[in-house]
């Protein structure tokens, strides 16, 4: 007998972090991912003379980086574990059947440095988006409401 939508939905893991929060992290991570190397090593993050470059370059005290670290650090331990699991799921191109194994590994390796770990992951936003896609979720509604 084929699965119904109701049966499929019950097979999805219940995330400890809400979808809007994940989408907000993805949106900000995209902004961070596209930054270029700093063109003026003496400039600070908020150099008033060159604000367009400050926004596009990876500079010390980057407000996007600081916001992402704070958003991830403010999540509960379970929320941080789910976010790492989601990133791994998307990065590896894994299927939903591997969620429990990835989550168990993320839980056993959880430290107080989740934000730094995730921020050091190249293409974080892409991996989180791919992980959501594996769960049958996306950020279209969030993007529509937060242009």
Image (cartoon, helix red, strand yellow):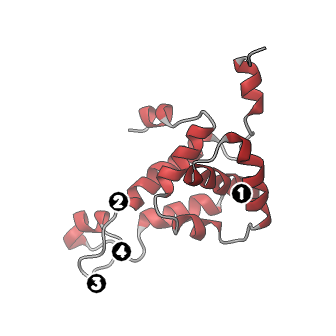
- Measured in 3D between alpha carbons, the distance from the residue under mark 4 to the one under mark 1, in whole angstroms, is 28 Å
- Mark 3 lies on a secondary structure that is loop
What is the secondary structure assignment of the residue under circle 1?
helix
The residue tagged 2 is 34
Badge 2 or badge 1: first in the primary sequence: 2
Q: Quadrant of residue 81?
A: bottom right
In front of the other: label 3 or label 1?
1
> Which residue in the protein does label 3 denote?
41
Whether the residues at callouts 3 and 2 have beta carbons within 8 Å, the answer is no
Quadrant in the rendering for residue 136: top right
According to the picture, the residue beneath numbered tag 4 turns out to be 59
| Mark 3 vs mark 4, CA separation in Å | 8 Å
Tell me the CA gap for discs 3 and 1. Answer: 36 Å
In this picture, is 133 found above or below 128? above
Spatial CA span between label 2 and label 1:
25 Å
- Quick one: SS at disc 4? loop
Label 3 vs label 2: CA separation?
18 Å
Viewport quadrant of the N terminus: top right
Give the number of the mark in front: 3 or 2.
2
């Amino acid at each position: 007998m084929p699965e119904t939508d109701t049966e499929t939905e019950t097979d999805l893991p219940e995330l400890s972090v809400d979808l809007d929060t994940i989408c907000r992290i993805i949106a900000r991570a995209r902004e961070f991912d596209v930054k270029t190397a700093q063109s003026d090593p003496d400039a600070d993050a908020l150099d008033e003379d060159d604000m367009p470059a400050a926004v596009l370059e990876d500079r010390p005290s980057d407000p996007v980086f600081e916001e992402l670290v704070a958003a991830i650090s403010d999540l509960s331990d379970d929320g941080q574990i789910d976010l790492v699991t989601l990133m791994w799921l998307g990065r590896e191109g894994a299927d939903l059947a591997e969620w429990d194994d990835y989550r168990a590994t993320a839980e056993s390796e959880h430290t107080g440095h989740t934000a730094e770990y995730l921020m050091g992951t190249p293409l974080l936003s892409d991996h989180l988006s791919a992980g959501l896609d594996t769960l049958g979720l996306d950020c279209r509604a969030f993007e529509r409401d937060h242009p």
